[in-house]
């Protein structure tokens, strides 16, 4: 079975500061990992995905994440926060193919001017 | 925009009633997955349909049922609604064949169901 733990239900950063959202996973087989973003009253938008190729994955809107097998982590980073980054971020794991996603509980990112 | 559309956007029902939610998948996608997102939680997998057959189910009771049609659109039906069924219901479509986008799930905006 797979599971995801997102450390910190709420993260607050200043505009221009580094964004770091933490995700640790558990999987009995090599995982596929995803980060999704959810803006208020909207569905989920895919930010980036890891599917066993390069361990450093670049996504949309300047976000990237690094897969670290030894730490079972897939933390999301962005060098400089923008006000438009304020949203809920979800990390998810699957075992590949068209298998269901298992989501973490989410981290709400606030950006302070 | 993902091309996945859900209707209606909002719905209010009373306990014991039945509800049907609809999802049109992105063009070329043959798989639809449904998720329930309770307030303040991450989405939880309900079930998945592939080529009109149920292809996996999460930990939800039988009163949650679904259909997939030949055009790959889908319905989620919930009978005997309970207060705890109040949530955002998300539909995601994916394709088992589309090259680089293979098996990536693209989500609709969801249907917010309130059960009173």
Image (cartoon, grey):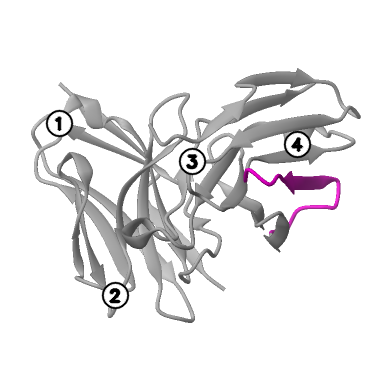
In the picture, the quarter occupied by the C terminus of chain B is top right
**Front: mark 3 or 4:** 3
Q: Which residue is mark 2?
A: A71
Q: Quadrant of the N terminus of chain B?
A: top left
- Which segment did they paint magenta? B58-72
Q: Secondary structure at mark 1?
A: strand
Query: Which residue is identified by label 3?
Result: B26
Query: Which of the pair B72/A45 is nearer the observer?
Result: B72
Q: How much space separates mark 3 and mark 4, taking CA atoms? A: 30 Å
The residue indicated by pointer 1 is A14
Is A40 drawn above or below residue B96 in the view shown?
above
Disc 4 crowd rating (10 Å Cα; few below 14, some 14-19, many 20+) is few
Could you say which disc has been placed on residue B96 in the image?
A: none
Dot 1: within a 10 Å radius of its alpha carbon, few (fewer than 14), some, or many (20 or more) residues? some
Residue at image position (49%, 81%) is A28
Question: Which is more foreground, mark 3 or mark 2?
Answer: 3
Residue assigned mark 4: B84
What is the crowding at mark 2: few (fewer than 14 residues within 10 Å), some, or many (at least 20)?
A: few
**Image side of residue A99 versus residue A36, left or right:** right
Question: Would you say A30 lies left or right of B14 here?
Answer: left
Q: Are the residues under badges 1 and 3 in a single subunit?
A: no
Image point (45%, 72%), residue name: A26
Q: Nearer the viewer, mark 1 or mark 3?
A: 3
Cα distance between the residues tagged 2 and 1:
28 Å
């Amino acid at each position: 079975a797979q599971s995801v733990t997102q450390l910190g239900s709420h993260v607050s950063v200043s505009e221009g500061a580094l964004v770091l959202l933490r995700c640790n996973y558990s999987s009995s087989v090599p995982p596929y990992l995803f980060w999704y973003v959810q803006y208020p009253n909207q569905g989920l938008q895919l930010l980036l995905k890891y599917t066993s190729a390069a361990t450093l994955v670049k996504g949309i809107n300047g976000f990237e994440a690094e897969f670290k097998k030894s730490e079972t982590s897939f933390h999301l980073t962005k060098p400089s926060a923008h006000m438009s980054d304020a949203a809920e971020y979800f990390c998810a794991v699957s075992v590949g193919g068209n298998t269901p996603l298992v989501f973490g509980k989410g981290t709400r990112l606030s950006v302070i001017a | 925009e993902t091309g996945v559309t859900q209707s209606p956007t909002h719905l209010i029902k009373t306990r014991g009633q039945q509800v049907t939610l609809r999802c049109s998948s992105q063009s070329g996608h043959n798989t639809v997955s449904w998720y329930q997102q309770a307030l303040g939680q991450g989405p939880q997998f309900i079930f998945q349909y592939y080529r009109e057959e149920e292809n996996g189910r999460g930990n939800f009771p039988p009163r949650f049922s679904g259909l997939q049609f030949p055009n790959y659109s889908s319905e989620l039906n919930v009978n005997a609604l309970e207060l705890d069924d109040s949530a955002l219901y998300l539909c995601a479509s994916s394709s088992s064949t589309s090259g680089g986008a293979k098996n990536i799930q693209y989500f609709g905006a969801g249907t917010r169901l309130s059960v009173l």
